[in-house]
Amino acid sequence: MKSQTEVGAALDAVLGAMGQAAPPAPSLAGVAVLPSWRRLALVLSVGSLAVPAAILPFVSWSTVQHASVPASWLVAGILVLLAAVAGVVAAKPRMSVWAVTAVMALVALVTLANASGVEMNRPFFAGATCGVLEFLYAALPLALSFWVLRQFAPLRRRVLATAVAGSSGALLVLHLHCADGGLAHQALFHLVPWGLTGVLALLVRRLRPATFAP
Amino acid sequence: MVSFQQGQSTAYDTLYARHAGAVRGYLTRLVQNAATAADLTQATFLSVFRARDRFSGSQRFKPWLYAIATNAARDWRRHARFETVSEDGATPDGVYDGPGPRDVGLERQVWRALESLPEAQREAIVLHRFQGLSFSEIAELAQVSESAVKVRAHRGYERLRELLAEVKP
């Protein structure tokens, strides 16, 4: 086996011999400066919060999804906060993957820990309507999220955070509207579709970004 | 960079003159194609220009610049088939700029060995050995801890030792 010095010599012989002439500078005529990350965070947060603001006045509200009314409002409050803050977490140039994971884990934990267990009298998979509705409600903010994503280098953690931020308003609508407090229903038809938007967004990550800046 | 953010247009030219050559060298080492590296260098500096408001004064410029270049190279890899190593495995024309004659056999093995490394390990080695970035600067650009970067580089060298066992430089 070679020593590290010998490996270094082989690398130097090949990689060290490369020219470093600068190419011509790119033309900057007509090149616009990108929106600031604060503005993009605002777009994400407003886009996400606009969904519950637009839909909740027109649907019935239920409080039996969680073990108690205070628990239900606690979760609702956390979701509002998430929709507002997730935009900042997603758009901040030096975002922390731990912040994204922690926020997602918190939402899942609080939602499931407070599930009332009161199930609706219907076949289990009829509850899939909630998942479909969540995707529909999230469509517009997700479209905004993809536009925002093009303003950044397509890093995996940012894609995930941005998509989750976009769909958190839809999660809030379901939380206040749905009357099914079953743990399995909450997990499978509320939280899984919410997380799935992040996974789907990762597939769309192949869109050409407008910049490679983090 | 701060002068450029404050609106001094000549500051951008200074940044370009100071860093473009090194960035092109870095990108050539990553994508193994001189023409692609030149395009990506331009894309990197366009990104610097477009995203200048996102640079924070508390940051160091070099890690930020190399983070952009790394993202550009990764994006290129995602979209383009890796086609720069020719049939016989030698480096394409326009890359080699060394003093002596080319050793095509050595080039072939070194490129293939580098190509087989995970990109994070390859980037850590190239940035540290050839671009002169410190481990703390690489950690800043990769947004990981300094010890994680050291582990990446160490594992990369270990793997290269195995892959280049038969090579005589």
Image (cartoon, coloured by chain):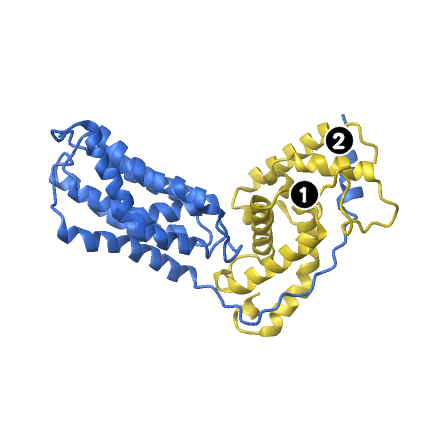
Chain colours: A blue, B yellow
Residue B37 at x, y percent in the picture:
67, 53
The residue positioned farthest toward the right in the image shown: B100
Protein chain holding label 1: B
Q: Does residue A15 appear in this view?
A: yes
- What residue is pinned by disc 2? B164
Q: Residue at x 26, y 48 (%)?
A: A137
User: Badge 1, how many Cα within 10 Å: few under 14, some, many 20+?
Assistant: few
- What residue is pinned by disc 1? B83
Who is closer to the viewer here, A83 or B37?
A: B37
Q: Residue at x 57, y 74 (%)?
A: B8
Q: Residue at x 82, y 36 (%)?
A: B105
Q: Is residue A68 left or right of residue A50?
A: left
Residue B61 at x, y percent in the picture:
58, 58
Who is closer to the viewer here, A30 or B101?
A: A30
The residue positioned farthest toward the front in the image shown: B87
Q: Is residue A142 left or right of residue A121?
A: right
| B110 to A20, vertically: above or below | above
Residue A175 at x, y percent in the picture:
20, 42
Badge number at residue A69: none
Q: Amino acid at mark 1?
A: Glu
Q: Is residue A57 left or right of residue B127?
A: left
Give the mark, 2 or 1, whose residue is nearer the N terminus. 1
Query: Quarter of the image containing the N terminus of chain A?
Result: top right
Who is closer to the viewer here, B73 or A89?
A: B73
Q: Residue at x 55, y 67 (%)?
A: B2
Who is closer to the viewer here, B75 or A168?
A: B75
Residue A6 at x, y percent in the picture:
79, 34
**Closer to the camera: disc 2 or disc 1?**
1
